[in-house]
Amino acid sequence: MEFLTLDKLPKHVLASIDLQRAFIASRLIVAAERLQIFRVLHGKRMRGGELGRKLVIHKAYRGAVLDSLAGLGLLQKTKGKYRNTRLAEKYFIEARSIYWTRQYSKECAEAYEALRKMEKTLATGRQSGELRARKKLTYTEAMAKDRRRAEDFTQMLFHFHQKDAQALARRLDLSKHRAVLDVGGGSGVMSIALAKKNPGLRACVLDLANVCRVARGNIRRAGLSGHIRTLAGDIRDRLPGGFDVVMFCDIGPVSKRLLGNAYEALPHGGMVVAVDRYLSEDRTKPLDRVMAQLAGSSFPRATRREMVGALESCGFRAVKARRVLRDLWAISGVKHAYSQTQSR
Ligand SMILES: C[S@@+](CC[C@H](N)C(=O)[O-])C[C@H]1O[C@@H](n2cnc3c(N)ncnc32)[C@H](O)[C@@H]1O
């Protein structure tokens, strides 16, 4: 999804938006999605009291929340009953799975909390003890502990990465390769697209046990259980051999240690591919990635050129940066094949 930067908004729209108030509206929408107000109202009309009881919304806020959502054009209020507008149906129900609703709204709520900490740190010039003391689980630790969290996150990305996966399968020529290790392969979305495009290809999704369980369901539903398997493990450990492609797709920063492990595991002529939305050279794009740093994200902070350099410094040759789709790039390199670095 492309981030709409302020310069792209028509001037009269920009003049009429109060960005600080828009922040309050956005916080309200995230709260509504977390409560699943739009899902409960899907195809129904309800009075505030009935909806409040169903979702356990305290009456102190109930009227203001529902009426604000109506004011924003997300609910329609007729004779005291609320229902979703077409916009809410389209945006919150049709375009999103339940996993997306649960996981994304949770991530947004965590981001607001992180922004509060950012503000406190900016204002005081130092991180207070309170900010340092509370150690939060990383998302992988949380998924390792909690199956539901693993399912929500993984299936949200299964939905979210469909177009990226199709584009990667079109853009990456794997016709001469036979087996891909999809490191941190999550839902299997990328492996599924690659296996569909290259019927002779085998793939293996390496991920946490709770994530592999979800991936197996997706692979089975895609009719590819004979082509793609899963392997539960830690991607920071030595990687298994037997693959002529090692792929890292959207797994956070790909360290030199990970690249070194890929180099070790690959045969001569084998290929490594790192796929992500790397930062532009001036580090101002993609804007959502740049701003996500303020909310404590673990997205990579490497630019495309830095990734090319990282692959080369780990011994890979014929390193190429290819645009996959919009701001998604694939940086590939070959073990022990000699040619020049190029960028397209
Ligand atoms: C953002 S998801 C991307 C999934 C998939 N590659 C895709 O593009 O849809 C990153 C995945 O890497 C996995 N991962 C990250 N660190 C890991 C670790 N240390 N061990 C195993 N899996 C890990 C996560 O569990 C998650 O499934």
Image (cartoon, grey):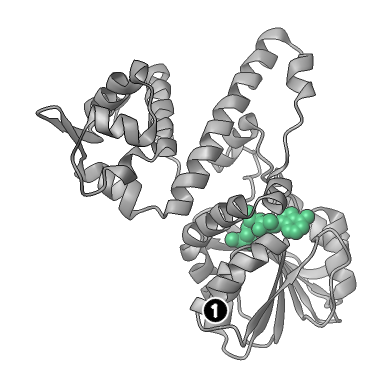
Q: Quadrant of the C terminus?
A: bottom right
Does 139 sit above or below residue 225?
Answer: above
Characterize the local packing of mark 1: few (<14), some (14-19) or many (20 or more) Cα atoms within 10 angstroms.
Answer: few
Q: Quadrant of ligand 1?
A: bottom right
Could you tell me residue 29's position as x and y percent? 38, 32
Residue at image coords 75%, 50%: 306
Q: In the rendered image, which residue does mark 1 sit on?
A: 220
Residue at image coords 33%, 31%: 53
Residue at image coords 51%, 55%: 156
The single residue placed furthest to the bottom in the displayed view is: 200
Picture quadrant where residue 324 is located: bottom right
What SS does tag 1 mark?
A: helix
Does 325 sit above or below residue 304?
Answer: below
Residue nearest the viewer, comparing 74 with 120: 74
Could you tell me residue 236's position as x and y percent? 84, 58
Picture quadrant where residue 208 is located: bottom right
Left or right of residue 57, residue 327 in this image? right
The single residue placed furthest to the top in the displayed view is: 124
Could you tell me residue 226's position as x and y percent? 61, 88
Left or right of residue 13, residue 143 in this image? right
Could you tell me residue 114's position as x and y percent? 62, 27
Camera sees residue 330: no
Left or right of residue 27, residue 224 in this image? right
Residue at image coords 23%, 34%: 75
Residue nearest the viewer, comparing 279 with 77: 77
Camera sees residue 223: yes
Q: Name the amino acid, label 1.
A: Arg
